[in-house]
Image (cartoon, rainbow, N blue to C red):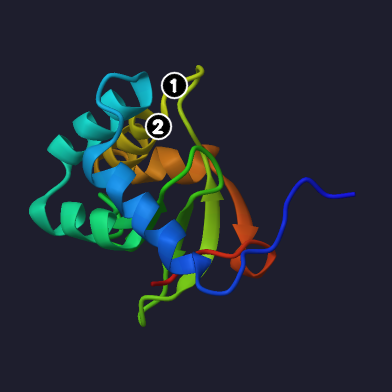
């Protein structure tokens, strides 16, 4: 028996709205909320808008100039985008330690934008067909 249930029709929009509200405001007195606030402060205006609206933001790799998409999450939440902006390959990498989600995502952003080659050396790669990335 599974602990997960499928979403009822119409509940996807509520889940999306709840996610956007938490991203935009967070529970500011919690470690998670403070980490998301710090992440938002480090995002460019365009990245911040993407993150609030879509639950992810895009970063440009420092060495190759490739676009990456960082989804809300701690692991297996980064993907390389193809020339059409579709997920091509997934990357799993994160900093050491039990960090709040915003801190993990900020570390991923900084790593991609400053030391992309190191990220590609340590990241575990996976095909995006084995994992569903949100595209909208």
Q: How crowded is mark 1: few (under 14 residues within 10 Å), some or many (20 or more)?
A: some
As drawn, is 7 to the left or to the right of 88?
Answer: right
Q: Mark 2 points at which residue?
A: 104
The picture quadrant where one finds residue 23 is top left
Q: Which of 32 and 5 is in front in this view?
A: 5
Query: Considering the numbered disc 1 on the image, is that residue within a helix, a strand or a loop?
Result: loop
Q: Where 15 falls versus 121 (above or below)?
A: below
Q: Quadrant of residue 35?
A: top left
Residue visible at 50% across and 17% down? 97
Q: How many marks?
A: 2
Q: Distance between the residues labelled 2 and 1?
A: 6 Å
Q: In this view, does 132 lie to the left or right of 114?
A: right
Which is nearer the N-term, disc 2 or disc 1?
Answer: 1
Q: Position of residue 83 (x, y in %)?
A: 36, 79
> On the rendered structure, is 89 left or right of 46?
right
Residue linked to disc 1 = 99
Quadrant assignment for the C terminus: bottom left
Label ID, residue 83:
none
Q: Are marks 2 and 1 in contact (CB under 8 Å)?
A: yes
The answer to whether residue 59 is seen in the rendering is no
- In front: 50, or 4? 4
Of residue 30 and residue 37, the one placed in the foreground of this image is: 30
Q: What element carries label 2?
A: helix
In the rendered view, would you say 115 is above or below 87? Answer: above
Residue lying furthest bottom? 84
Image coordinates for residue 116, horizontal then vertical, percent: 35, 45
Please name the residue shown 27% across and 19% down the image. 29
Point 20% across, 29% down: residue: 38
**Residue shown at the point (50%, 73%) measured from the top left:** 10
Is residue 7 visible from the viewing direction of this image? yes
Residue 124, x across and y down, in percent: 60, 45
Task: Using the rendered view, name the quadrant where residue 128 is placed.
Answer: bottom right
């Amino acid at each position: 028996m599974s602990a997960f249930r499928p979403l009822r029709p119409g509940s996807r929009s509520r889940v999306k709205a709840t996610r956007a509200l938490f991203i935009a405001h967070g529970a500011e007195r919690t470690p998670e909320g403070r980490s998301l606030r710090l992440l938002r402060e480090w995002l460019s205006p365009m990245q911040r808008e993407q993150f609030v609206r879509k639950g992810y933001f895009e970063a440009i790799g420092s060495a190759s100039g490739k676009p990456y998409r960082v989804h809300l999450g701690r692991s297996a939440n980064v993907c390389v985008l193809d020339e059409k902006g579709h997920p091509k390959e997934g990357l799993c990498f994160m900093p050491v330690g039990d960090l709040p989600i915003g801190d993990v995502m900020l570390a991923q952003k900084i790593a991609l934008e400053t030391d992309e080659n190191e990220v590609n050396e340590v990241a575990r790669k996976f095909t995006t067909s084995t994992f569903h990335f949100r595209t909208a």
